[in-house]
Image (tube, helix red, strand yellow):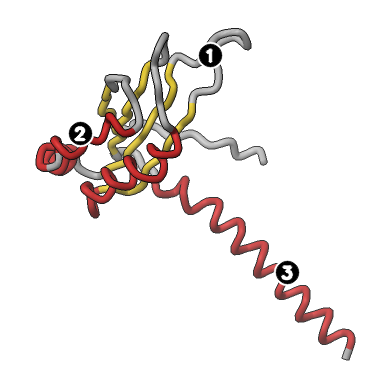
Amino acid sequence: MATKIDFFLLIFALTGLISCKTGQQKHSSTTEIGTFKVAILYPNGEDKTFDMVYYEKKHMPMVAGFLGKNLKFYEIDKGIGGRTPNDKAPFVAIGYFYINDVAEYNKAIAQNRDTIINDFKNYTNIQPVVQVSEIRQLGYDNTK
């Protein structure tokens, strides 16, 4: 009887470990060469304000909703430092949208431009810089 219980516990533990590993890989496998990345950069500086909680909970989810099925996923970076330990972060925050189609992205943003721009005042006084890029190469550390 103890052997059967040990066997089932082993199977249960292995299933849990496999599902954890699968969950970790799911995000990275969503990014593919040919996917487009929209980076929204918020430059740091004197008298700049930024409400990260609002950006995370309200603004980015709102814009993500406008993008619909064209959006693969989005990310938010919070700047914590620069090139050296004493340097301030050059950007307070950077938001990323990973999308399939740039024309569809532009259409969705144009249709909701006023709503997006009017929401800036709720979390920042920074004029963001936007860059659209095509992902050309992905690299992974396979030594782990």
Q: Are marks 2 and 1 in contact (CB under 8 Å)?
A: no
Relative to 9, 104 lies left or right: left
User: Local crowd at mark 3 within 10 Å, few (<14), some, or many (≥20)?
Assistant: few
Q: CA distance from mark 3 to mark 2?
A: 50 Å
Q: Is residue 43 above or below residue 115?
A: above
Quadrant (top left/top right/bottom left/bottom right) for the C terminus: top right
The picture quadrant where one finds residue 81 is top right
Q: CA distance from mark 1 to mark 3?
A: 42 Å
Q: Secondary structure at mark 1?
A: loop
Q: Amino acid at mark 2?
A: Asn
| In-front residue for pair 65/5 | 65
Residue 125 in picture, x, y percent from top left: 31, 21
Q: Earlier in the sequence, mark 3 or mark 2?
A: 3
Q: Amino acid at mark 1?
A: Gly
Residue 68 in picture, x, y percent from top left: 23, 52
Quadrant (top left/top right/bottom left/bottom right) for the N terminus: bottom right
Q: CA distance from mark 2 to mark 1?
A: 30 Å
Q: What residue is disc 2 on?
A: 118
Q: What residue is disc 3 on?
A: 13
At 40% across and 21% down in the image, what residue appears? 49
Q: Secondary structure at mark 3?
A: helix
Residue 24 in picture, x, y percent from top left: 56, 51
Q: Earlier in the sequence, mark 2 or mark 1?
A: 1
Q: Amino acid at mark 3?
A: Ala
Q: Secondary structure at mark 2?
A: helix
Residue 132 in picture, x, y percent from top left: 25, 28
Q: What residue is disc 1 on?
A: 82
Q: Earlier in the sequence, mark 1 or mark 3?
A: 3
Relative to 24, 48 lies left or right: left
**Res 11 label:** none
| Tally of numbered discs | 3
Q: Is residue 78 above or below residue 44?
A: below
